[in-house]
Image (cartoon, rainbow, N blue to C red):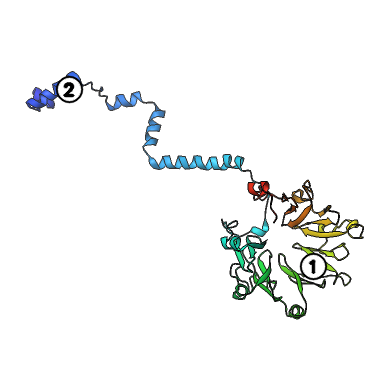
């Protein structure tokens, strides 16, 4: 049999006087936790606690779990707080990258005084009282570019000229200067952003009353009532204007495939493809009601008669044919792709139509503070 010193190795250790004193003091005054063996510790811990303890030791696993919970919250709670229409598609916005510049208008435009604003699919162009042009928003995508330029690349001749009117098509811009010259830039795949040669002679001899820009075509209305249309017109034939109408046009409301023409006798004539846009009420064509102003959305038309009454027709999408309650005398009308707006003489604004991007949520300052513009 081995000696006791060999069987109990702890007895081999010799302790000093101070070590023995400290050990005695600790046993007398310090309560030590009972020491458990590995087997005893495993026996006292449940499987759930063991899994939780092991999981909490892995920081990467914790980060992954938190991220997964955030994804679930964003998918389910977020869609509840901000509902979306999964069936809605907007083909005009395809391939356009996200941006935050749509509402960031130039401060210089406000400082110089806003004279006019016109919007395309992802950008806006503004004209100041000083005759300067400003563009903001996001660059739209071009298909079949041709000799196209960016809408943000304002030509040098436009910057040097005194511009009196600007108008934005879906992806191109037209500007009219005080000398009657038309400038264009942006998408030009159907030459909608450049002046045709046979139009140039008319511009040299006639006064321009209005310039119009739509999706892929453009138009000029002269002071004598003649309308000239160019660009992509083979599919919609908006350029087919009857001879009895030419020379009598006082205003034009254009959409992608149609145009509504207000004539000098207060009647309305339409051009383009056959659709709800062209189903003009008979009383607006036979002269029994005299129209003084009109605007259009993509598939609907809104007209104002000389008695202050509104007339609307076209496609019923987005309930755009449901007119809001009149808050006074109509001072100005505006039409967008899927929306319409009215400005009344008391400064109140009515806006209706689609609301996919919060366009019906007017700022409190606009809805509560009357204005004159």
Residue lying at 17% horizontally and 22% vertically, measured from the top left: 26
The number of numbered badges drawn on the structure is: 2
Looking at the image, is 356 positioned above or below residue 127? above
Screen quadrant of the C terminus: bottom right
**Quick check: 250 left or right of 159?**
right
Q: Nearer the viewer, residue 202 or 318?
A: 202
Tag nearer the camera, 1 or 2: 1
| Residue 154 position by quadrant | bottom right
Residue that numbered label 2 is attached to: 26
Looking at the image, is 311 positioned above or below residue 206? above
| Residue 95 position by quadrant | bottom right
User: Looking at the picture, how far across and down is residue 312, in whole percent?
Assistant: 82, 53
Screen quadrant of the N terminus: top left
Mark 1 touches mark 2? (CB < 8 Å)? no
Q: Nearer the viewer, residue 26 or 126?
A: 126
User: Looking at the picture, how far across and down is residue 2, in whole percent?
Assistant: 9, 24
Cα–Cα span, label 1 and label 2? 102 Å
Which is nearer the N-term, disc 1 or disc 2?
2
Residue that numbered label 1 is attached to: 238
User: Looking at the picture, how far across and down is residue 196, in whole percent?
Assistant: 72, 77
Looking at the image, is 16 positioned above or below residue 372? above
Q: Which type of secondary structure does the marked residue at label 2 adopt? A: helix
Q: Which type of secondary structure does the marked residue at label 1 adopt? A: loop
Residue lying at 39% horizontally and 29% vertically, measured from the top left: 49
Residue lying at 67% horizontally and 53% vertically, measured from the top left: 89
Q: Nearer the viewer, residue 28 or 33?
A: 28
Q: Which mark is residue 1?
A: none
**Quick check: 325 left or right of 243?**
left
The reply to whether residue 7 is visible in this rendering is no
Residue density around tag 1, few if under 14, some if 14–19, many if 20 or more, within 10 Å = many
């Amino acid at each position: 049999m081995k000696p006791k010193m060999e069987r109990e190795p702890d007895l081999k250790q010799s302790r000093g006087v101070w070590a023995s004193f400290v050990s005695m003091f600790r046993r007398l005054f310090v309560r030590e936790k009972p020491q458990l063996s590995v087997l005893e510790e495993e026996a006292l811990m449940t499987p759930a606690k063991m899994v939780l303890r092991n999981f909490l030791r892995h920081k990467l696993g914790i980060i992954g779990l938190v991220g997964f919970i955030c994804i679930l919250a964003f998918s389910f709670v977020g869609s509840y707080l901000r509902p979306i229409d999964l069936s809605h598609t907007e083909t005009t916005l395809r391939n356009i990258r996200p941006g935050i510049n749509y509402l960031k208008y130039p401060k210089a435009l406000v400082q110089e005084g806003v004279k006019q604003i016109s919007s395309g699919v992802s950008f806006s162009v503004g004209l100041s009282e000083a005759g300067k042009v400003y563009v903001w928003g996001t660059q739209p995508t071009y298909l079949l570019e041709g000799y196209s330029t960016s809408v943000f690349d304002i030509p040098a001749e436009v910057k040097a000229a005194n511009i009196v009117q600007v108008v934005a098509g879906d992806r191109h811009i037209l500007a009219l200067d005080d000398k009657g010259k038309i400038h264009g830039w942006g998408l030009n795949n159907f030459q909608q952003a450049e002046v045709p040669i046979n139009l140039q002679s008319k511009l040299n001899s006639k006064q321009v009353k209005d310039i119009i820009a739509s999706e892929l075509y453009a138009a000029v209305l002269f002071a004598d009532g003649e309308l000239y249309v160019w660009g992509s017109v083979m599919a919609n034939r908006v350029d087919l204007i009857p001879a009895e109408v030419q020379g009598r046009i006082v205003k034009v409301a254009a959409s992608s495939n149609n145009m509504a023409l207000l004539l000098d006798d207060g009647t309305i004539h339409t051009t383009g493809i056959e659709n709800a846009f062209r189903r003009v009420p008979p009383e607006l064509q036979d002269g029994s009601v005299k129209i003084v102003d009109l605007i259009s959305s993509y598939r609907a038309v809104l007209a104002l008669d000389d008695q202050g009454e509104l007339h609307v027709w076209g496609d019923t999408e987005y309930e755009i044919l449901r007119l809001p309650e009149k808050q006074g005398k109509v001072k100005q009308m505006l039409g967008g792709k899927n929306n319409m707006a009215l400005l009344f003489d008391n400064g109140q604004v009515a806006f209706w139509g689609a609301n996919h991007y919060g366009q019906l949520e007017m700022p409190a300052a606009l809805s509560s503070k009357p204005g004159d513009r």
